[in-house]
Image (cartoon, rainbow, N blue to C red):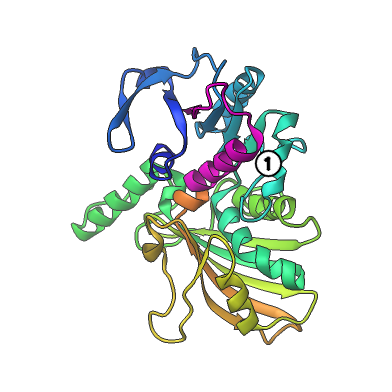
Amino acid sequence: MLKTLAERAFPVSEAFALASERSVGRQVSFGEDDVLDVQDLDSFNFKGIDIALFSPGAKVSAVHAPRAAKAGCVVIDNTSQFRMDHDVPLVVPEVNPHRIADYTRRGIIANPNCSTIQMVVALKPLHDEWKIRRVVVSTYQSTSGAGKEAMDELFTQTRAIYVNDPVTPEQFPKQIAFNVIPQIDSFMDDGSTKEEWKMVVETRKILDPDILVTATCVRVPTFIGHAEAINVEFERPCDADAARELLRRSPGILVQDSREPGGYVTPLDSQGEDAVFVSRIRRDPTVANGLNLWVVSDNLRKGAALNAVEIAEILAGRYLKKPASGGPRRAVGA
């Protein structure tokens, strides 16, 4: 988030880096020249802070996001804690930026799940044109979605296999190296996982409550970048060529769809990129009004940091009063 704020030259007069007590005193980079001393989240006074970007885990956000909001700070929270709260807007700027105005209800704006974000960015222009009835999505999600330790486990297991050392899963329920795992997050009573449930309920909250969504979420042995195979059924007749042009003209989307070897985007191609990439656009002949899409994005950027910063940009530019000095704002990253 700090890197993205700096890259996009977000107007800020003073920035603070917050973490738990054990990280106090460490330093983190903010742009090319600035270094921030990490301060203690538990004791930090949010009074006078305009915007806080939170990504400390749901339990920590549950305690400190309301505390920051009570002090007059607007929190953009990247955890799952507030996403389904009725009075907290769940925002993807390319899809429902008008919902940012609802921050006044609680002082909190929720950042959606990474896999949901890239899907709804791709679906929004198609929904506006033909109205989506049903979505069937299968995800191919990288290990970074489970954190640094999960990425380390993929690296360690891969190395162990090459030198014939034993492999012991710790972060994942099964070996991740040279394997795929059809479980992300915990299981629910109906057999779905929480990740699959998130894609269903978040898509309906962000895009349209009438859309039917079914998801299968799979962890794959890559480091960065989520991919999704999406089947969409519309209420009105659709066309693959028209869809391709709609997507090309839509914000936040890059279409790379040549029907030849390599004429599509892979998770590796998306690393470090801001866009949601769409490839393999084609008609589904098994339903009356159906299309298939391949959607890829860097889950750490558009799936998390960039989406939060884009929300902050709209919030600062349209809704928050400028300081009396006319200068830039004070921001916090937790």
* Quadrant position of the N terminus in the picture: top left
Residue 28 appears left or right of 1: left
Q: Is residue 98 above or below residue 278?
A: above
The answer to whether residue 168 is visible is no
Q: Is residue 300 left or right of residue 130?
A: left
Q: Considering depth in this image, is 10 or 23 the residue closer to the camera?
A: 10
Q: Which residue is drawn at the image coordinates 72% and 67% (left, top)?
A: 127
Label 1 is placed on what type of residue? Answer: Ile
Residue 287, given in percent of the width and then of the height, sits at 73, 82
Is residue 63 shown above or below 80? above
Q: Is residue 314 magenta?
A: yes
- Residue 288 in view here: yes
- Asked if residue 181 is positioned above or below residue 236 in the image, the reply reads above
Q: Is residue 178 left or right of residue 294?
A: left
Between 226 and 164, the one nearer to me in the picture: 226
- The question of residue 296 being in magenta is answered with no
Residue numbers of the magenta segment: 304-333
- Residue at 59% x, 82% y is 282
Label 1, on which residue?
100
